[in-house]
Image (cartoon, helix red, strand yellow):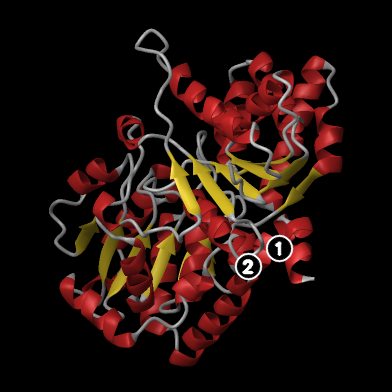
Amino acid sequence: MNHPSRRLVIVVRADPVICGHSGEARNLAEVALTRGFDDVRLLTWPIPTLEAAGLPLKPLDRLLPYSEGITVERPEAVGDYRVPDGRHLAGLTGRLVELLAEPVPTVCLSMYLVPHTTVVVDAVNAARAAGFTPQVRTIAKAVGSDVTNVIRNCLREGRWGAATVLFTTFLANDELVAVSEYTRDEIIATAEEVDTHSGTTFAEQCRNRVTVSYPPIDASAFLDPDPSEVDAALSRRGLERDGYILFLSRVARAKGIYDLVIAYGQMRCRDKVKLVVAGNGPALEHVRAMTKEDDRIIFLNDVDDDEKTLLMRGCAAYALPTKPEPDFVETFGIALAEKMLAGGGPIVTTLTGGTGEAVGDAAVIVEAGDINGLAEALDRVILEMTPQERADLERRARAKAMEFDRGAVFDSLFPQESAAVLG
């Protein structure tokens, strides 16, 4: 049997999930093909399972294809209804054991500690216990909500045992990565809380071992979109260049969507620009109901990856007034960096979590939760900012966002593999 020479396996919630980290996995997979990996696999969930979970999903008929050499595997559940959640984990873990049993040098990257890093650690342990001697190096990437949603909830609820399991699973990997400096700091801070309660030494280990790897973005997909394609996309949606404020993200309270629609109601610029809410999410139907009398607010829940760039380029301003919530803090802001590459109107956002690492000095910043300040900032951007000021912000934004181009991020995350090919 012929085996590939080098394999990369990424365990993640992949497309069609609307999540920056599904795009992150896609970008790492595509670059891997240019860095000597001849077998790249995304291990993820069956689509009916994603749909049943209530996750916001992209239109299935408009998903971008992966390059040849990238295989997306969606293992079916193992067992029946009597094993309600573990069935799918068993399917993922079992398939990874099968891959590790092959004599192929493998790098295995997991995104989200729960449950994907658990899948990797269990599969590696099982393969070794079975005597397969896998040639594997594991990298666990904490993507933010691992801390802000999962670990923080454990601490709030006094579930120290669960927090201990999360940290021991994380630390069991060969390399530990956080999606931003903010996320790294949060990992260490929560580890210190567990240490104080339980006498463990997680914080010191995390402080010594966790590095930062920002999300990789395919810059070429956003830079310099064809002006005619921008105009055509806007025309199909009944929009005009510089004729709308764009919110393109998961429609959720933590993304600041409620603050934005309330602020829009009091903006002086609302007669000049519409508000376009593009995306899906748990707050979508409630926000629709709230704004049903306002015909200046347009909802788009079927925007694909190609159209996303065009809408970003054509907007008068892009607003993401994200704010900290108990279950979510914006730990980087991939959509912000994508918008910075696409050009178009200025970004108005907040310094929540890791957003400052994404935007640098290339955005207009408002205080999280300050509705009046948000309205004033967008009025200033649209009604008062000069063309020269807008062009300067756009130039600085693009230069900053190029730091996150997927090739550079891949080479930093996988230096051994990249050096072997590029050296």
Considering every residue shown, the one lying at the far bottom of the view is: 388
- Disc ID at residue 330: none
Task: Kindly identify which residue carries mark 2.
Answer: 407
Res. 202 visible in picture: yes
Residue 34 at x, y percent in the picture: 61, 66
Location of residue 382 with respect to 86 vertically, above or below: below
Location of residue 406 with respect to 63 vertically, above or below: below
Q: Who's the residue at 41% across and 79% down the image?
A: 344
39 to the left or right of 338: right
On the rendered image, what quadrant is the N terminus found in?
top right
Using the image as rendered, state which of residue 230 and residue 275 is in the foreground: 230
307 to the left or right of 238: right
Q: Who's the residue at 69% across and 40% down the image?
A: 186
Considering every residue shown, the one lying at the far top of the view is: 82
Task: Kindly identify which residue carries mark 1.
Answer: 411
Q: Who's the residue at 44% across and 69% down the image?
A: 377
Residue 397: quarter of image: bottom right
